[in-house]
Image (spheres, grey):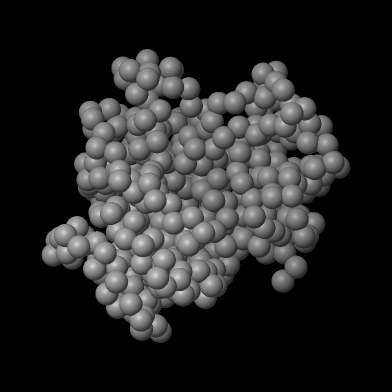
Amino acid sequence: MVANYIPRNTVELAEEIMSDTPVLTISGARQVGKSTLAQALARDRRALVLNLDERAIMLSARMDPDGFVRQHSDGLLVIDEVQRVPELLQAIKASLEEDRRPGRFLITGSSNVYALQGGQESLAGRAETISLRGFSQGERRGYKEDFVACLLKHSPGDFTCEELERSQYFDLVTQPSFPEIAEASERRVNRWVDGYVERVLSRDVADLVGIEYPDRLEKLLHYIAAQGSAEFVAAKVGRRLNIPERTVPAYLDALKNVFLVDVLPAWGTNVAKRVISKPKVQMQDTGMAASLAGLDARALELQISSSVRGGLVEAFVASELLKQKAWSDVDYRLFHFRQSTGSEVDLVVETRSREIIGIEIKAAVSIAAKDFAGLRALQKIASEKFRIGVVLYAGTRVLPMGEGLWAMPISALWGSAGR
């Protein structure tokens, strides 16, 4: 079942960090390839690799964390699944007081290691983190894609995009990005996902926060999967799932901290005072979401649930952009936008210099004038900071649709411009 090794687009950044920073942290969900990436980075270095999922190694780390992190002090120490022993973070900090040379530690975590019980030591100024996700579409095809940087440097008319039919997009949306099941059958994927979710909720969440009522956590995860990508209101979710409203935020944080879900905040400026502040929530992997929701590509094609179909396609686009963020030439954040008047844009990209890109996503092969209404509202509010608005759709043509507005195939996400 394990696919042939596919180089990750984060390698170059990881090498750069290790050249000038004492600690590199690779964080991400279980089975996204953190250990494989760590081993690739350690291959040409004098390294010792220790996995805390091995009982004897974990016991050693718990009994003597200071001695554990000081072994192999003249080389690279790789600690896999560090969330199993949070005390190691404090021990690493103490060790770095004596020796802060670059590339001393490479740690991986399947939970947010800085949200761990007993792991509040942030290693601020001593560590940098790479967020690793499943395969991006560019990684699957063997190159480094960078949609946001390309949009800021080139006209959409210069893009070269892969021509796909709508059914092929649905295949991509429902295909998990985890390396282990990249080539697995649908039946095997569904069984793998069920086992994966059970393990993460029963083991990793317990390590992170020791949360009560794991059945509620599972209900919430299935609810998010069935929504695709949707605004999240704790009171509404609590009523729908019969979960006390006050506990819903904690459950959501737990799912976020084990990298099962993404939370996209609402975008706004001081000028846009009517912007609603509810976040959008989606699963990190749309293939996993489809499996938990009991849907496949054929179901999406037959419009069994048009709202879920649109939500999953939107989540797929957001997921690809969040993957690319790890290696993009542009530092950006991802939001959504909705006004009380009803104007909305699925995704808003904001760069560090506050440049704005609006992205609307449609699962249809055609477009209409109304599809650009939200982008025009965003364009007016963002004013001179607005760089471009794009409707990504399941068609094949790149088309200008007014000043600063374009229609582009969804495949433009991993297309090229100016090569």
**Location of residue 244 in the rendering, given as x and y in whole percent from the top left corner:** 33, 18
Observer-nearest residue: 372 or 62? 62
Vertical placement of 156 versus 74: above or below?
A: above
> What residue is shown at x 80% (from left), y 42% (from top)?
385
Numbered marks: total: 0
- Residue 102 picture location, percent across and down: 48, 74
Compared to residue 364, the image places residue 236 above or below, namely above
For this orientation, the residue located farthest to the front is: 98
Q: On the image, which quarter does residue 235 sit in?
A: top left
Q: Is residue 195 above or below residue 12?
A: above
Q: Answer with left or right where residue 53 lies relative to residue 138.
A: left
Which residue is found at the position 79% from the left and 42% from the top? 386
Identify the residue shown where x is 23% and y is 30%. 212
Q: Nearer the viewer, residue 301 or 378?
A: 378
Placement of 17 over or under 397, stated as above or below: below
Residue 106 appears in the figure: no
User: Residue 383 occupies which quadrant of the picture?
Assistant: top right
- Residue 113 seen from this side: yes
Q: Position of residue 373 (x, y in %)?
A: 75, 30
What's the residue at 26%, 64% (across, down)?
A: 66
* Quarter that holds the N terminus: bottom left
Q: Which residue is more in the foreground, 28 or 219?
A: 28
